[in-house]
Image: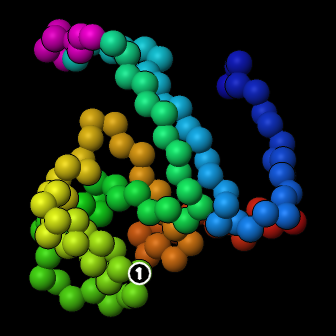
Amino acid sequence: MAGVAKHSPSFYRSSDPAENFKLKLQVRETSRIPLSDGDGRKGEAFSKDLEIAWQEKRYGPGDIAEFINHRDKKVSSATEREARRHLVAMEESGKPVTSLLKDVMIYTYTDRDPKAPKTVSLTHLAV
């Protein structure tokens, strides 16, 4: 692929505990593609700044859909029970789970997440 730079892995070592690690992200739209009905989006380009903490769970559309469609399903793992408790508590506080759905979503997997893709293995990054 022309124009794609190849980067070798790099590592940053710190004596701080991993719990202090935070990742700052800026997600921004770089181009607009007209929709098929010719009704392209109007307004400012999308831009969002985020800060995500180490092992912070941000629910994705699949997590939210599964919760909504299978509220009464018994979950087997402790991680799934914790996620279910969090989403139920959110609804009980008056904030609907659907409020987590956005046009552009950033969601995360944690090290104990049963929904993490099987192709991702962080053990190969260890040095």
Left or right: where does residue 42 sit relative to residue 112? left
Residue 50 as seen in the image, left or right of residue 64: right
Q: In this rendering, does residue 66 appear at all?
A: no
Residue 7 highlighted magenta (yes or no): no
The C terminus lies in quadrant? bottom right
Identify the coloring: rainbow
The type of residue carrying mark 1 is: Thr
Q: Residue at x 27, y 11 (%)?
A: 43
Q: SS for tag 1? A: helix
**Quarter assignment of residue 61:** bottom left
The residue lying furthest to the front in this view is 93
Camera-side residue of 16 and 100: 16
In magenta, the rendered stretch is 36-43
Q: Residue at x 80, y 37 (%)?
A: 7
Q: Name the residue under label 1.
A: 79
106 over 93 or under it: above or below = above
Q: Main secondary structure of the magenta part?
A: loop
Residue drawn at (17%, 53%), measured in percent from left and top? 98
Quadrant of the image for the N terminus?
top right
Judge whether residue 38 is colored magenta: yes
Instruction: Where is residue 125? Give x, y as percent.
Output: 77, 62
**Residue 66 locus on image (x, y percent):** 22, 67
- Rendering coords of residue 113 (x, y %): 47, 73
